[in-house]
Image (tube, helix red, strand yellow):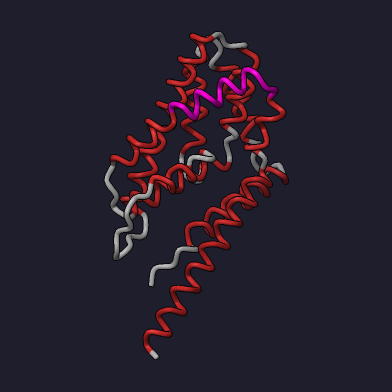
Amino acid sequence: MKYSFVLPLSALIALTVLSALVSYEVIPSGLELLQSVESSFKGYFYLLILLIILLESIVYVGFYFPGQFFAVVLVVLSKPQPQDILFLTLTMVVAATIGSCVNYYLGKSFGEVKTTRPKLALKNLLVAMIHINSLAFFMFTQGANQQSPKVVLWAGILNLPYYLLLIWGTSVLSEQVMQVAENTWFLAIAVGIWLAIALFWDYNKCKSKVDATD
């Protein structure tokens, strides 16, 4: 039997290990590393935005790099004009779409293939797009389930209004409001809920299988 809890459990373990390594100063924090990268990319604003969103959009890697928070800070400091907001939106969508492609093919190459291929539900994609890390694992799962690569295209199209609103909201609101989405506890709680739902789902599958054999 294929168990649904394996992927969220591995995500929770990865998040915990990375947080512990940063807390004990074994490795620098993702924000510190990105700040050092910023000094090397002065004059290449859009390339830097593309790089940090791409890093966060990769499955597991995104737990280490606070890409959206860092991008938010850069957007706030740059005080973008309407034309800048358009270019920033396109840059972030391109980066997130490249990340989705990478995650899809990682899942296709290394993910656990299910015996029955579940149909792609648009509402599941919309839920996954709440945070870039959840979208990463969603794309990994889609690749493992041998879904059509068109799911990456759909995500890219839907990311256009999402990032447009995100950047516009960022330019209007303060970064203190936006950084909630990059809080480690927020991510841990979200992954914990995902794990609890997966465990409940697996329990019901096991129970149904036992009942069927009685």
Residue drawn at 43 percent across, 20 percent down: 90
Snapshot quadrant of residue 34: top right
Residue drawn at 56 percent across, 31 percent down: 67
Decide: is 102 above or below 1: above
Snapshot quadrant of residue 12: bottom right
Give the image location of residue 63, x and y in percent.
57, 43
Give the image location of residue 3, x and y in percent.
44, 67
Tell whether position 165 is magenta.
Answer: yes
- The stretch of residues the image draws in magenta is 160-174
Decide: is 44 above or below 160: above
Tell whether position 130 is magenta.
Answer: no
Residue drawn at 47 percent across, 44 percent down: 59
Question: Between residues 29 and 160, which one lies in front from this camera angle?
Answer: 160
Question: Between residues 54 and 91, which one lies in front from this camera angle?
Answer: 91
Q: Main secondary structure of the magenta part?
A: helix
Give the image location of residue 150, x and y in percent.
29, 40
- Which image quarter is the C terminus in? bottom left
Residue drawn at 39 percent across, 36 percent down: 155
- Which image quarter is the N terminus in? bottom left
